[in-house]
Amino acid sequence: MNIAEQIAHYATSLDGRNLPPLVVERVKQRIVDSLACILGAYGSRPAKAAIAHAATLPFQASSVFGTNLRTSPDIAAFANGTMVRYLDYNDGYMSREPGHPSDNIPACLAVAEAEGASGSDLITAIVLAYEVQMRLQDAAGLNRRGWDHVNYILVSVAAAASRLMRLTERQTVQAINMALNGHIAMRQVRSGELSDWKGSSAANAARNAIFCAQLARHGMDGPSPIFEGRMGFIAQVSGDLDFDINRFGTPENGDFRILKSLTKTFPTNGELHTAVWAAIELKAMVPDLEEIAAIHIDTTDIGFRILASDPEKWRPATRETADHSLPYNVARGLMDGDITLASYAPAQIADPRAVALMSMTTVTEDPGLTALFPQHLANRVTVTLKSGEILTREVISGPGSVETPMNDADFAAKFRRMAADHIGPDKQDAALAFVRLLEQQQDYRPLFAAMRSTDAP
């Protein structure tokens, strides 16, 4: 079997009835985490644009969070996916290619609602989507070749949507073939000055994958072999693909990749979290920011390339650029002792104090830190004071890592923190209770009602 056929066989044969309890728990935690991110995106410009578009396409299939709108599953997946990703606060996975596997969750939810699939079916589809995307992230890096990681979401959502739509194995192959051939995304979305599309690129991949699954349902075929062909994904996009379906998780081996996904305590890029923790520690040691003479950040190869190599990262002008700027986030950590949603307000980004700290900052790759990647996202921050004293803090790992995962209480607190300005305590309780009993759910309307703000369109 070719790779698309192997993934389709896995997608249609995965036994969702015997998933390990820890895997089911992780799914629920990632859903709560995603709901928190969605709430934090309410009122944002990308969310408003996506919702406005959804309102032009009324279709009683799938709900849009924060609103009374219902639309087609692909458009709902786009609107809800844009909200999940807007803050860069959702989960991540670091391997040969970094990515955000929870980008699959809104797509799975949209299709599950449209198809009348049960909560148990939804859990299985999410586990499947995580497995496919993360194993592909293990198989090959894309960003060095100029392509975006969301290309893997084309495959994972095509497989998960096909599962929820109860497509045959052959139809699932065709959904993967069409999705991957027709919608390859370039890495420019994360280069230079970043735009609203940074948070919508994954949602768009999910939208396209659902559309292709719908076409496959009605008998359309796609180009094959999509991975191995002379003009296929391996030759044109990924290069060598270290793919082995036998590594995929099963109820028997319990080795599901969702157990390796990381979650965030700050609404910012995952590779720089440890630099923020280091800056926060240093803040307690620096009595006066005026005494700082120089700041140096040692980071990984990927940290340097993504977070410090573009000139725009040194004078960010947008929220999307600021939350991917290593010098900016270290400056704010030293100034505020935290990174919050307010850290990326226009006035904060333009703060002369932050600009001054960035102007005295240098960043280099440390091969020793690079060697720790992807197991650890390490950073080292060194502050030199005008007195000549040198202060250094190196952080290898932090909260939300595989070693120190967030627990149910942490996710609930994150959810309530993001919900406070949008829905009351009773609705917060209802949303959390829905996810807690997800296996028993047959109707998703109570979840969307609980997440609906009082001024919903």
Image: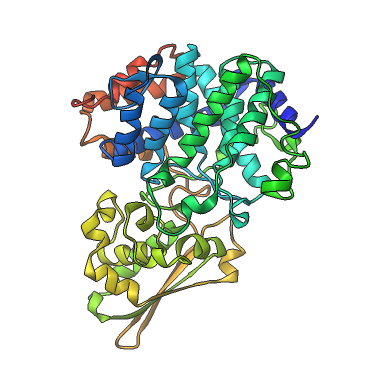
Q: Quadrant of residue 398?
A: bottom left
From this viewpoint, which residue is outermost toward the right?
A: 1
Q: Quadrant of the C terminus?
A: top left
Q: What is the residue that sits farthest to the bottom in this orientation?
A: 388
Where is 30 relative to 73, above or below?
below
Give 382 or 332, whichever is nearer the viewer: 332
Q: Is residue 276 visible?
A: yes
Residue 131 in view in this figure: no
Where residue 281 sits: x, y (%)? 35, 66
* Residue 210 percent location from the top left of the image: 53, 25
Closest to the observer: 26 or 161? 161
Indicate left or right for 223 with 287 as reference.
right
Task: Report the residue at 72% width, 40% height from top.
Answer: 232
Horizontal side, residue 94 vs residue 287: left or right: right
The residue sitting at 60% across, 50% down in the picture is 97
Location of residue 239 in the rendering, given as x and y in whole percent from the top left corner:
72, 50
Quarter of the image with the N terminus in it: top right
Give the number of marks: 0
Left or right: where 301 falls relative to 229: left
